[in-house]
Image: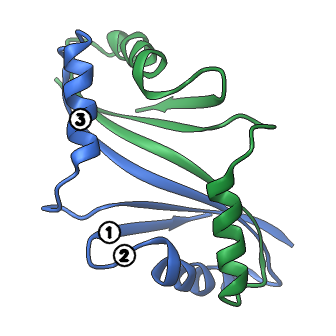
Chain colours: A green, B blue
Amino acid sequence: MEKEVTVTIGLKKGISDPEGKNVTKALSLLGFSSVKDVTVNKRYVITLDVESEEQIEQSVREMTEKLLANPVIHHYDIAW
Amino acid sequence: MEKEVTVTIGLKKGISDPEGKNVTKALSLLGFSSVKDVTVNKRYVITLDVESEEQIEQSVREMTEKLLANPVIHHYDIAW
């Protein structure tokens, strides 16, 4: 069966986020004074062809740790 | 009051997604044969200081169209 799994990856607290900082600055220069902070995450939508739901979590966790995220600086969240 | 708004930006259907294609290929080379497709989205988490909920939608839509997304190739989704 086909399943769509979403992996959201963001920077851990304390790791600097220059892209977010720049977006915050740019929005404020454009006149959006209500913006206090912006953080940027990445979201991978993975279509899997699996036999059972149980396989999903472990398999996607392995993918994320091997390729998509760097556990030293990123936190991630898997949802389906 | 402070509000956290999430803007998710992805490529429209029919626009090629080379990053997603490369991730799909890399995962398959790593042995994850169950992966059929990967698409990559970007997620901005914006902290706003607003007076009322009604301001949020219009203000964030304007930010997204002016700075964050390119309406020609991206679709976006605002949630809070």
Depth check, front residue: B58 or B22: B22
Residue at the limit of the structure toward the left, as seen here = B14
Q: Is residue B21 left or right of residue A7?
A: left
Tell which tag, 3 or 1, sits nearer the viewer. 3
Tell me where residue B1 appears, x and y as whole percent: 87, 73
- The chain letter for the residue carrying disc 1 is B
- The chain letter for the residue carrying disc 3 is B
Tell me where residue A58 appears, x and y as whole percent: 42, 10
**Residue hosting label 1:** B74
Q: Residue at x 62, y 30 (%)?
A: A74
Whole-number angstrom distance, CA of label 3 to CA of label 1: 19 Å
**Residue hosting label 2:** B70
In the displayed structure, would residue A2 be above or below residue A20? above
Which amino acid, by three-letter code, is at mark 3? Asn
Residue at the limit of the structure toward the right, as seen here = B1
In the displayed structure, would residue B75 be above or below residue B42? below
Q: Are marks 1 and 2 in contact (CB under 8 Å)?
A: yes
Q: Earlier in the sequence, mark 2 or mark 3?
A: 3
Whole-number angstrom distance, CA of label 1 to CA of label 2: 6 Å
In the displayed structure, would residue B51 be above or below residue A68? below
Q: Is residue B39 left or right of residue A75?
A: left
Query: Can residue A61 be seen in the rendering of this structure?
Result: yes
Which amino acid, by three-letter code, is at mark 2? Asn
Label 1: element kind: strand
In the displayed structure, would residue B61 be above or below residue A23? below
